[in-house]
Structures are given as C-alpha cells and as structure tokens.
Amino acid sequence: MILGLPHVGESGVEGTIGKWLKQPGDKLTRFEPLVEVITDKVTMEVPSPVDGSLLKILAQEGETVPMGAAIAELESIDGSNGAAPTPASIP
C-alpha cells in the first residue's frame, strides 16, 4: 500500500519529512511511529496504518511534499501492497 502524507489542521498544505523512524525492510506494528513530519505549526509523528513492513521510502528526510503525496510504500502482514486511500486527518 502507498502511505500518503496525512492532512494536518485546516491550513496545512505541505509538510517536511523530518526523520524516518523506520528503514526499508523494518517490521511495522500498526500505530507505531513511522516518520516525523514538520509543518509550519507542528511537528508530529505519523504512525504506521498497518502491521507489516516498510518496503520503500518515497520522500527523503528534508524533502517538502504536499499533503496527500505518497511518502512510503508499505506491505501489510496479509501481503497486500496495492494502493490504498490516504488518511484524511490525524488528530
């Protein structure tokens, strides 16, 4: 599945990848912090939406990307890695 940069707040249009907390090949647990994202108002940790593994990083540390843009490719424990909708919001 493709992980998109979640929308943060009402005025956020882009975010900068701060630090990847996992690397390709690492196992993921659902809700475990995956990447730090910096916006003009907040720094947040984006959690993994699935149990599985990180296949590929698509947005590098320091890169600024629009909200909703693909930032990583994940594989869920059930083996699926097809595109999935991006989360609309993270509280």
Image (cartoon, rainbow, N blue to C red):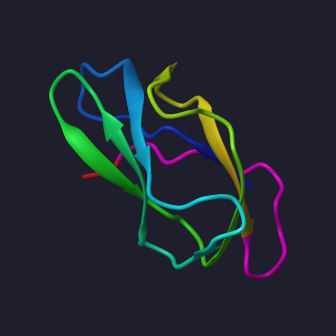
Q: Residue at x 41, y 45 (%)?
A: 19
The x, y position of residue 14, in whole percent, is 40, 20
Q: Kindly indicate the quadrant of the structure image that contains residue 82.
A: bottom right
The reply to whether the magenta stretch includes residue 78 is yes
> Does 61 lie within the magenta span?
no
State whether the magenta stretch is mostly helix, strand or loop: loop
Please name the residue shown 64% across and 71% down the image: 26
Instruction: Determine the residue positioned at 73% across, 81% down.
Output: 77
Taking 79 as reference, is 10 left or right? left
Quick check: 66 above or below 58? above
- Where residue 89 appears, x then y in whole percent? 37, 45
Could you tell whether 21 is left or right of 68 in the image?
A: left
- Residue 27, image x, y percentages: 63, 77
- Percent of width and height locating residue 76: 72, 72
**Image quarter (top left, top right, bottom left or bottom right) of the N terminus:** bottom right
Foreground: 40 or 17?
17
**53, above or below 39, in the image:** below
The reply, left or right, for residue 31 in relation to residue 72 is left
Number of callouts: 0
Task: Check the image and report above or below for 35 versus 22.
Answer: above
Q: Quadrant of residue 9?
A: top left
Q: Can you say whether 26 is above or below 73 in the image?
A: below
Nearer-the-camera pick, 57 or 91: 57
Q: Which residues are magenta?
A: 76-89
